Amino acid sequence: MSPLRFKPLLIPLSVLAIAGTAQAAEWNMATPYGDASFHTQNIKQFAEDVAEATDGELRINVHSGGSLVAHGEIKSSVRRGTIEVGEVFLSILSNEDPIFEIDTLPGVAGSYEEAMTLWETTQPMIAELFAAEGLIPLYAVAWPAQGLYTRTEITDPEQFEGLRVRAPNINTQRFVQNLGGNPTETEESDIPTAFSTGRVDAMITSSATGNAMTAWDYISWYTDANLWLPKNLVFINQRAFDRLDEATQEALMEAAAQAEARGWQMSRDNNETSLQALEENGVSVVAPNEAVADALQTAGDRLFADWQDRASEEALELLETYRAGLEE
Ligand code: PCA
């Protein structure tokens, strides 16, 4: 093939100047949750929206379910720039700062409205902590409220004694301990194995994850305890962002804002359909009785007191601001 076949077009300099430095970019994104998760479905839609809004100038390849990077490595991989975009369960970062687990505390935000207000209040501090590491949060979406999945009905707090409970983060593990149980931290994708190998008897998670992980294969009861609504956070590498031209940056941010709004609605809808799916598949969905509710409350109060001891002044102030906002 003649090298002259692709003659460069003669483009006037003035046009080149207008075109700026735009260069198509291809980004990789790692997520911890599988394709059955509404978070992943929302992320895939987000990637499609970005490609469309930028005419393919920015393409995001989504690697779901920890297939590219394990959950615990996602944040550091985005920080290093090995990948450009990541999603994490925000509260797994609690060892870095207790602000990250403010959404896994009982009695703080028990509805979608409150969870959203909590996010709006804490977002600036979270963004600042991320910025210090060269990261930019794009958006966050809450999971449905967390509850307890068990093989038998929980009617008496004594049943928590020694119960081996799967938990998705450290705070939930502490909560299980406060109840008298034995917690194990397990990734969502490892839930079926944890049950089938007899490592756990129960789990704390949402209706959404129970449904996505076909909980009816290993448990029969879901105590819908409305514990808290924890969030996933999607974030990017700042340097990768800086390399984009302004129009692409704007399109990305616009798609992120849409993904946040869409994701919260998906979470509400998914909660409804998941509770239905659980029941249709033979899981009894029940509210805790008074004695169990009291035990959950006591365990929660302890968890909250411990958190207050660890939290920074700034985090405690934000909690106050949040609470004052709810009273308005
Ligand atoms: N599902 C995820 C995080 C919280 C949730 O509802 C999990 O259980 O791992």
Image (tube, rainbow, N blue to C red):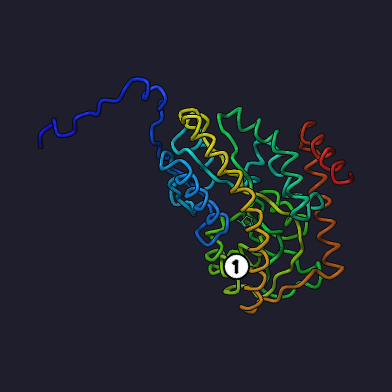
Image side of residue 234 versus residue 101, left or right: left
Vertical position of residue 19 compared to residue 271: above or below: above
- Is the CB atom of the residue marked by disc 1 within 8 angstroms of ligand 1's nearest atom? no
Residue 204 can be seen in this image: no
Q: Position of residue 201 (x, y in %)?
A: 64, 68
Question: Which quadrant of the figure has residue 296?
Answer: bottom right
Q: Position of residue 72 (x, y in %)?
A: 54, 45
Crowd class of label 1 (few under 14; some 14 to 19; many from 20; radius 10 Å): many
- Residue at 52% in and 39% down: 251
In the rendered view of the protein, which quadrant contains the N terminus? top left
- Residue at 72% in and 50% down: 104
Vertical position of residue 38 compared to residue 286: above or below: above
**Amino acid marked by disc 1:** Asn
Judging from the image, what secondary structure is the residue with disc 1 in?
helix
In the rendered view of the protein, which quadrant contains the C terminus? top right
Residue labelled with disc 1: 211
Furthest residue toward left: 2
Q: Position of residue 176 (x, y in %)?
A: 72, 57
